[in-house]
Image: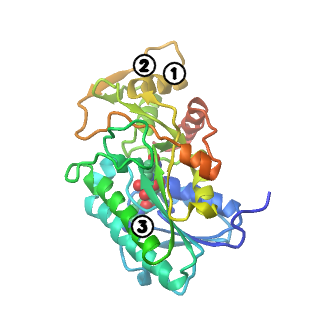
Amino acid sequence: MPERFSDKKVLVTGAAGFLGSHLVDALLAEGAQVTGVDNFLTGNKNNLAHIKTENFAFIEADVNQPTDQYLKNQIFDFIFHFASPASPPYYQQFPRETYLVNTVATDHLLNFLKETNPNGTFVFAGTSEAYGDPQEHPQQETYWGHVNPNGPRSMYDESKRLGETICGVFYRTFKIDTRIVRIFNTYGPRIDAHDGRIIPSFITAALKNEPMEVYGDGSQTRSYCYVSDLIEGILRLSLEPKAKGETVNLGNPGEFSVLETAKIVWEAIHGTESEPKITSAPLPKDDPMRRQPDITKAKQLLGWEPKIDFHDGLKKTIEYFRHADI
Ligand SMILES: NC(=O)c1ccc[n+]([C@@H]2O[C@H](COP(=O)([O-])OP(=O)(O)OC[C@H]3O[C@@H](n4cnc5c(N)ncnc54)[C@H](O)[C@@H]3O)[C@@H](O)[C@H]2O)c1
């Protein structure tokens, strides 16, 4: 198969993060020349340590700074803006960094593209959190969401929503090719073991034979997308000519209650012989009760749907955690 990004120059922000590092790998495999930027706020140098090719360059920088502080005379065909703390404990620990990177940095990077290569493509890492605690189920891109503008998750949810607005302004007013991916819960190797996201939290607890902490009665639902599926969807979104200016959900529609998830993770590690160890904790404020992507648009526009079954993806992720230093 021909390489889809042959000789394309690509900038990835948040390159040392979970998704950013997988995106870098996929782009390099598709023939791109990739520049990664990261300030290691929540990322990890080890996520890029395996990359040996001269087609990859790394810049350690804070993308909340004006771009001329870290980019010199470079021109990119694609910018993937993936820098941002992504889990509630991290975005609550870094609230200003979070709202700045999704808004001010988005504006800086789009302005940079407009000035240096107005024909380039900009892909923004949006989120299912844009739907808040949704009143419609499953969530379609046309749903405007149900978000608390001033609550414990707003620095993330609302700044991602404003990030989308900024993409829309550059698309409509300045004719820049922007595309927004609303990413639903994604997991896989390199996801941070300690950032409080459900899959790594359950896996690390179960591997240590410790109780998994379930919020509330565990009846709230989540859907989990394996990282390779998500990355393939993102590549297709960035390349599809009909996706200019579009917003597309990417995620796995398989829906599991949190309690069910805990049992599946426990069984994948300990088998069915022992009862899962579970403790319960109060439901955090504004925790969404149901999350499930409607991926009709991704199917129609990109011919994309996830391929990796939850149990198979879990196996690969558990294997990674068995060898990771957690
Ligand atoms: N993983 C998911 O399930 C998920 C779901 C929805 C949206 N997203 C979005 O995808 C993107 C990547 O998420 P992730 O899961 O890989 O998180 P991550 O924390 O592993 O990666 C984010 C990376 O961005 C870097 N970063 C943060 N602020 C920066 C700054 N100012 N300058 C330079 N680098 C900075 C961090 O150091 C980190 O390496 C984020 O924008 C996130 O909001 C992820």
Mark 2 / mark 1, whichever is N-terminal: 1
- Dot 3: within a 10 Å radius of its alpha carbon, few (fewer than 14), some, or many (20 or more) residues? many
Q: Please tell me in which quarter of the rendered image ligand 1 is found.
A: bottom left
Instruction: Give the secondary structure at mark 3.
Output: helix
Q: Is residue 73 visible?
A: yes
- Dot 2: within a 10 Å radius of its alpha carbon, few (fewer than 14), some, or many (20 or more) residues? many
Q: Which residue is mark 1?
A: 267
**Viewer-side residue, 280 vs 142:** 142
User: Which quarter of the rendered picture does the C terminus lie within?
Assistant: top left
| Residue 131, position as x, y percentages in the image | 35, 47
At horizontal 60% and vertical 52% (from top left) the residue drawn is 301
| Residue 325, position as x, y percentages in the image | 49, 44
- Amino acid, disc 1: Glu
The reply to whether the C-beta atoms of the residues labelled 2 and 1 are less than 8 Å apart is yes
Instruction: Give the secondary structure at mark 1.
Output: helix
Residue ranking furthest to the left: 150
- Identify the mark at residue 168; answer none if there is no mark: 3
- Amino acid, disc 2: Pro
- Dot 1: within a 10 Å radius of its alpha carbon, few (fewer than 14), some, or many (20 or more) residues? some
**Viewer-side residue, 45 vs 137:** 137
Mark 2 / mark 3, whichever is N-terminal: 3
Mark 1 / mark 3, whichever is N-terminal: 3
- Identify the mark at residue 276; answer none if there is no mark: 2
